[in-house]
Amino acid sequence: MKNYDIIIIGAGAAGLFAASTLSKTNTVCVIDMGDEPARKVAVSGGGKCNFTNTTADYTHYFGENPNFVRSALTQFTPNDTLNWVKSHNIEFSEKTPGQYFATSAADIVTALMQDAKNAKLMLNTTVKAITKDADIFYVTTTSGTLTAKKLVVATGGISFAQLGTSDFGYKIAKQFGHKIIPPRPALCAMATKIFKSDLSGISLPVMIKINRETINDTMLFTHFGIGGPAIYRTSVRDCNNGFTINLLPDTDVFDWLKSEKQKNGKKQLKTILGTKLPERVAAFFAENNTKNIADYKDTELQEITNRLTKTTITPGSFTMHNFQSAECTRGGVDTSKISSKTMESKLCPNLYFIGEVLDIAGDLGGYNLQWAWSSAMAIK
Ligand SMILES: Cc1cc2nc3c(=O)[nH]c(=O)nc-3n(C[C@H](O)[C@H](O)[C@H](O)COP(=O)(O)OP(=O)(O)OC[C@H]3O[C@@H](n4cnc5c(N)ncnc54)[C@H](O)[C@@H]3O)c2cc1C
């Protein structure tokens, strides 16, 4: 039986980053059930890996206790990530202020592998069971049993299963007394029948109000509902109270329609709406009516205004699309019994949880990988 100081389950972003630093002073084995390491990193950011965001702080994270991220993000900051990328001579660019992408995600994977070279990497190996006896962890895998003094669980979330995911991290957590916050898809599209499926393919800038937040981004109509960055960002937040969508955020719509009624009364409403909205969206909101705008009462124009600027997506009128397409899992190992300074379990000494397996979900924009890096570096 091979003995290590530290065994890390999961060779994803968090597991490999932890391996790079821990293997400087310990014998480390990283075990992954897949045939390639860092598979999510490889596809992240559409192949360009949005590896950090310098605005990352607790306000960009969601879960039962977003404050949990504070210590780790201070110990290893987005600027530390940027310096790490620079130290590997990886080509990168700043897409929006503070949001950094690599030219190729493959370069990030190569750098992770280079840094973790002192650790033993066991691919195509699934961890099946853990036991702890006399302060030693016994790790039963499909390639035999290994032992370690410390065990790091970096098994990720359960979304995007086509890349190989498992709920094994949740099982270990439960085994050692941790609570699991029910996982759900996040950073994903939503299924809803509020809009017609024939709007599918159209994208437009919208303003979404959810709880006390305002999201300005692009929304995409899909054949099953709504998607695009605005909806992805909405999906990671607490959606229990629903949200509203404004399709003309830069227009005082009622004033505009009343003034058009005066100036262009003989034009059809859908033609007027079509000057500011894609044609099919304009027709949908004019309910394919061929009436001229002059024939609409002000109260009707007010109703149309409300539908355009405050389409309400009530809690019962949508579902998160699915785990298969979600970029992140919201929920996971409850952070209340994990040290935010070291990621060690407060219930089982020398057991650590890092990355997406925890009940921490970051916003769209590089926050999830920053969490993977920061939580990995927090291990003491
Ligand atoms: C399509 C897509 C695009 C994304 N783009 C971005 C982006 O641009 N920027 C960003 O910040 N975030 C992005 N994310 C999110 C980000 O990739 C993840 O949050 C991050 O990779 C999570 O890292 P992790 O190490 O915690 O888990 P993972 O990367 O999921 O790694 C977990 C590993 O554990 C292994 N494992 C699980 N169970 C077992 C077991 N029992 N035995 C052995 N191995 C096991 C799995 O095989 C897997 O390799 C994206 C996600 C997706 C799906």
Image (cartoon, rainbow, N blue to C red):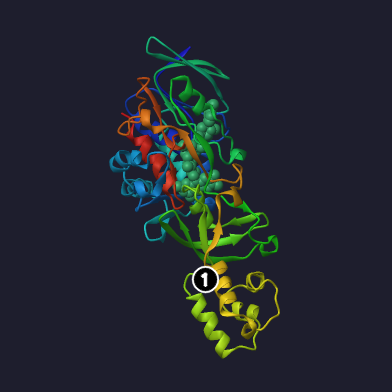
Residue 64: give x, y in percent of width and height.
41, 39
Residue at figure coordinates x 56%, y 69% from the top left: 308
Q: Residue furthest top?
A: 134
Three-letter code, disc 1: Leu
Looking at the image, residue 56 sits to the left or right of residue 274; the answer is left
In-front residue for pair 129/285: 285
Residue 90: give x, y in percent of width and height.
41, 50
Looking at the image, residue 5 sits to the left or right of residue 33; the answer is left
Q: Examine the image and state in which quarter residue 223 appears.
A: bottom right
Residue at figure coordinates x 65%, y 63% from the top left: 201
In-front residue for pair 111/326: 326
Crowd around label 1: few <14 · some 14–19 · many ≥20 (10 Å): some
Residue 270: give x, y in percent of width and height.
65, 78
Vertical arrangement, residue 6 with respect to residue 372, above or below: above
Q: Is residue 98 visible?
A: yes
Vertical arrangement, residue 173 with respect to residue 187, above or below: above
Q: Examine the image and state in which quarter residue 22 appears.
A: top left
Residue 156: give x, y in percent of width and height.
49, 35
Vertical arrangement, residue 180 with respect to residue 306, above or below: above
Q: Is residue 43 visible?
A: no
Q: Is mark 1 within 8 Å of ligand 1?
A: no
Vertical arrangement, residue 374 with respect to residue 82, above or below: above
Instruction: Give the quarter of the figure containing the C terminus.
Output: top left
In-front residue for pair 3/237: 237
Number of numbered labels in the structure image: 1
Give the SS element for disc 1: loop
Residue under numbered circle 1:
248
